[in-house]
Amino acid sequence: MAIDWDQVPAAIWRPRSGQLRQVRRTDPIAFSQLLGVEVQKRALIGNTEKFLRGQPANNVLLWGSRGTGKSSLIKALLNEFFTDGLRIIEVDKDELVNLPEIVDNVRDIGKKFIVYCDDLSFEEGERTYKALKSVLEGSIELPPENVLVYATSNRRHLLPEYMAENLTSKVVNTEIHHGEAIEEKISLSDRFGLWISFYPFNQQDYLAIIDHYFADLYIGIESSDTTGWSEAKEQLHKEAIQFATQRGGRSGRTAWQFYKNKVK
């Protein structure tokens, strides 16, 4: 069944049926809910706005620490720019071999499409990334002007790198020349024209997010009761820090999980 892209905001590629399944109920998250990533947010929005205006825009790799909002930013894009004609197609990493066919289905549709691949990385010996290369920069045919690829990953270069591979690198006239194995791995991430980096939150940023989620708690305490307000905030911060320690790190995801765990 053909997808009515005027009404449908997103689709997911289903390999068993070999077709796109429309998604009508999407995550309603908004940019205002994503804290501690203001620089990353501006970069992603700026690139997407250029894309929607028909100006040159880049494929985007959002890489870095887990739980810092990479995937949530992609979802927020759809909610922000749906009325401007933005649509998203989610493709699993293992189905990237079907990417050329998926793109062919939408290249002549009058909408702007982001092909979204979450948690993108490849292990040694995998070759599905070659299909991704052809979509990112084209083969004999130019990539479609209405499609960009946005991917999230914990790895900057998407492929595993080993110490032994660096031994083949050498310096020529003060410039570093990587060995063939490293060059092959870097060549994939290089096809993403915009890299947006995400780093672990420091304690100050983490607690700022906690305060945002629990703002109603503070509002419920009389403003004149400064002692009660201070004690409530101090206790909440203590519990939030303990929760993050148990989870192995501070992040926006950890703050949200603490909020859900705490609220009755």
Image (cartoon, rainbow, N blue to C red):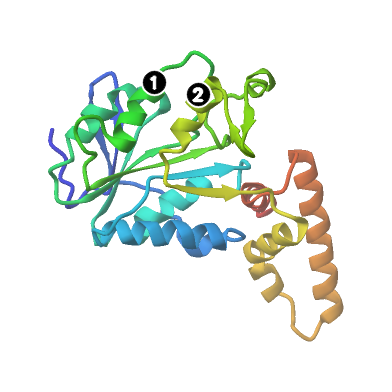
Indicate the position of residue 119 as horizontal and vertical percent values: 50, 34
- Report the residue at 73% width, 60% height from top: 207
Residue contact at pointers 1 and 2, CB within 8 angstroms? yes
Indicate the position of residue 237 as horizontal and vertical percent values: 79, 59
Q: Earlier in the sequence, mark 1 or mark 2?
A: 2
Q: Disc 2 residue type?
A: Phe
Which numbered dot is residue 161? none
Helix, strand or loop at disc 1?
Answer: loop
- Report the residue at 67% width, 21% height from top: 167
Residue 114's image quarter?
Answer: top left
Name the residue that disc number 1 marks.
128
Indicate the position of residue 113 as horizontal and vertical percent values: 27, 46
Q: For this view, does 94 lie left or right of residue 232?
A: left
Q: Residues within 10 Å of mark 2 (few under 14, many from 20)?
A: some
248 or 117: which is nearer to us?
Answer: 117
Of all residues shown, which one is farthest toward the top?
125
126 or 220: which is nearer to us?
Answer: 126
- Report the residue at 66% width, 49% height from top: 251
Q: For this view, does 236 lie left or right of residue 163?
A: right
Compute the Cα span from label 1 to label 2.
Answer: 8 Å
Quarter of the rendering occupied by the N terminus: top left
Residue 82's image quarter?
Answer: bottom left
Of all residues shown, which one is farthest toward the front?
173
Name the residue that disc number 2 marks.
122
Of all residues shown, which one is farthest toward the bottom?
224
Helix, strand or loop at disc 2?
Answer: loop
Q: Disc 1 residue type?
A: Thr
In the image, residue 136 above or below residue 57: above
In the image, residue 53 above or below residue 225: above
Q: Residues within 10 Å of mark 1 (few under 14, many from 20)?
A: some
